[in-house]
Image: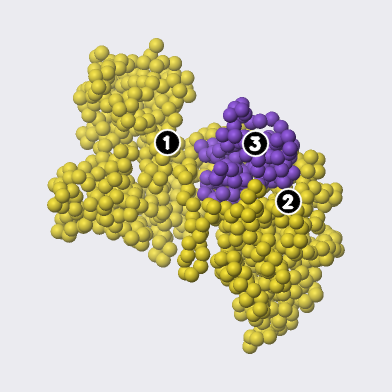
Chain colours: A yellow, B purple
Amino acid sequence: MSRLVVVGHGPTSNRLVEALLAGGFAGRVTVLGEEPRPAYDRVALTSYLAGRSVEDLTYPVPEGVVLRLSSRVTAIDRDRRTVTVADGHVEPYDVLVLATGSSPFVPPVPGRDLPGCFVYRTIDDLDAIREAAAGATGGVVIGGGLLGLEAADALRGLGLATHVVEMGGWLMPRQLDEGGGAVLRGHIEALGLTVHTEAGAKEVAAGPDGRVSGLVKPDGEIIDAQVVVFSAGVRPRDELARQAGLEVGPRGGVAVDDGMRTSDPAIYAVGECALHDGMVYGLVGPCFTMAEVAADRILGGEAVFTRADLSTKLKLLGVEVAQFGAMDGALDVTFMDPVGGVYQKLFVSDDARTLLGGICVGDATPYNTLKPFVGRDLPGAPSELLFTGGPANMELPDDAQVCSCNNVTKGQVCAAITGNGLTDVAGIKACTRAGTTCGSCVPMLKRILVSSGVEVSKALCEHFTYSRAELFDIVRVRGITTFSQLITEHGTGRGCDVCKPVVASILASLGNGHILDGEQAALQDTNDHFLANIQRNGTYSVVPRIPGGEITPDKLIVIGEVARDFGLYTKITGGQRIDLFGARVEQLPRIWKRLVDAGFESGHAYGKALRTIKSCVGSTWCRYGVQDSVGLAIALELRYRGLRSPHKLKSAVSGCARECAEARSKDFGIIATEKGWNLYVGGNGGFTPRHADLFASDLGTEELIRVIDRFLMFYIRTADRLQRTSAWVEDQGLDYVRQVVLDDSLGICADLEAQMERHVAGYADEWRTTIEDPDKLRRFVSFVNAPGTPDPSIRFETERDQVKPVLIPLEAVRS
Amino acid sequence: MTALREDLETTCWTPVCSYTDLLPERGACALVDGRQVALFRTFDGVLYAIGNHDPFSGAQVLSRGIVGTRTGEPCVASPMHKQVFSLVTGVCLDDPAVSVPTYPVRVAADGAVEVGAG
């Protein structure tokens, strides 16, 4: 039986053992770890200070491995093939793997051993830094490289005024050029950190208590600090190898061949302690590859480690920083946006056709799109690629690496997709490991998935194989009125938070009575179920309808009185209404009663439904107005109130071309002309803003309403779940929607208009119906067994003379 | 109705409402010994009780989520950020490292729903 011993238990060692066991290694595997805890994810170390637990960061120890923790190996006896642990234990091996990693380099600065000086390497280091930071106000990180900036982020997170001291001329000199470093510096200083470049450390000064009190720079400046973190590079831990007479490099590192074998054929070295072809690697990707090569060789394979890609992409202090390929070239192209803090540079060959490398700060899109093209012909002119973020439809070659952390090529991803019938990114991750480490290649994986012709399922969820539009037709054509009937006849299981609200919306659009009637009540999302909007502490906000934003003084006073009497926070919304926040479920019916009695009704702010129709003051008051925008907005809002749709609907009417109501950012917007109304559709605020397109011009009021009726109903019938009009219009094509709605090319317009007429005729205020129904009212309690008791976990404090929720502290939750 | 736990005899049962107070496939919250317990009645009439506290948002809201199934397992989606929890085990099906407590629940002879907190 063969005995394999691994010295060191970090990410590389862990990957090696995993690969060995996955490959069916039959011998005994013993791992000797120096730290008191099993291997953890060092890349995510800083998240530990932000509250992530050690358990979260720790890799699971594979079954069948003997793991000895707190076991520092002190000697290797190559003749007897044993290693000796500090506690005297002797472990025999047939094959030995050194995975001893590296140790932080601490420059010989006077005072570097004072209490308050740290390195940034292990969980124990972080614990010590956190403890020292508790009574401190200032911190210094020596080293402005990748790890130094991460340490600086950690110190800042611990509340210290943080300085970064870098010997070189700019930050991250190994990954960035001067221009990139300067832009990065701007980002970091904007976060409140102080950056010193071309600066070293002359001395760490001590205070009267013998602890660190500051850092003295060579120019004599003293930085006030009680915590000093050295992050000036790492050194391979090769002392065991040296002592055992193995070959090491002139500047350290255990020399290995392409199979990760040291000068002793029974001993391998992997990870940051290994020196391959004159290089020591400090990045997780190459280290994992070394582990897999060594495992393959130990199992009898012939895997080869070649010079690894040193590309890096990361988010440092919230700033995207990336570097790939070479850091110089015959020609380069730079894109610089000093306002947005973006710096992007591509290095290309002298004929400007071959991509050699690139640098990105502030926006790493070129890293994702262009990195696979390193060493190949560029898919376009370099300047164009930088300005547009890369061509939309570029074909990657099969041998292009898409995941550099796990060394996965496009060809491997494609093979996994076709070989296993994969249909989603999760499947690619499971089969290839691509996308599982830093995740920056996930958008690329999605694109490969789509371009490999995978039919992305239209199924709504696991319960229905139909799209929303198909379900709408099934419900409409078969006259189905309940979820139970629909899922029994056309689905499986009992539904979920995806399909139930969709079916609720379809039933509501087709006029099936109050949304809380009978079985429909169980389909509604919490907002619709309580006819109010849930907010972060579990209370609700209430928004009465104020059509067109026009409101009488008496009604304004009622809203004020209700808010005062129930202790609610009030805010004018972006849609010209008033939002009342902080209502508990048991207060909702009493709040509505007061509002309904004063002539208000539900504003449907809680629903995927028509929200507001904003207006300017129009021709009545405005000296520029050419039409009555308020009158039209009110008429439209009353016509479409309560209309449920795939997504919320917003609209606005502007009384002249000055567009004060911002109608072109709405799902449908109307702008007055001298000759009538112009209708715009498919506008969108929100996450992906889009200006609405002109749909029809100079319409009379009646004609306008008929066109909107048709447009909205066609959208409601055919859009996907949660698809806004903007995406729907782009999907269908504006011309096609025009043909259907204006030219009646499908012959369905009469039907669409009739459906809208039924909606308008059948409208009833949901609040009023609810407060008049004792059965429905019984649901509005915090506790079914204590109806009068308010939820004690909801508490408020005061800010700017109004209530605000006291947030409940989150228990540690896995991210 | 079958009990969910073996230790019936040692469990202390608190009546909270009548079975018909619970709508099919909808939750309600009960206050039991100062704890907020989310009660659910699934389509087939079975009752489940889990903690009302949503570990992701910190709010006491799980009783207000949408009830359904995931690969046949009864579950509820938090109304806050839609993480789905098994009604049987309390485990978050989207992140199995997170779970909420489960409580025994039964219908007594008089039709009262009782929650066990012993």
**Residue type beneath disc 3:** Val
Q: Which residue is mark 3?
A: B105
Spatial CA distance of label 2 from label 3 is 23 Å
Q: Label 1 lies in what chain? A: A
Residue at the spot x=17%, y=59% of the render?
A221
Q: Which residue is mark 1?
A: A55
Residue at the spot x=43%, y=27% of the render?
A61
The one nearer the camera, A317 or A794, is: A794
In this rendering, position of residue A254 left or right of residue A210: right
Can residue A261 be seen in this snapshot? Answer: no
Residue A166 percent coordinates (x, y): 25, 53
The one nearer the camera, A333 or A123, is: A123
**Residue type beneath disc 1:** Glu
Most extreme residue toward the top, as rendered? A1
Residue A85 percent coordinates (x, y): 26, 22
Residue A52 percent coordinates (x, y): 42, 43
Secondary structure of the residue carrying numbered label 3: strand
**Residue type beneath disc 2:** Ala
Spatial CA distance of label 2 from label 1 is 42 Å
Secondary structure of the residue carrying numbered label 1: helix
Find residue B42 and name its label: none
Residue at the spot x=29%, y=41% of the render?
A125
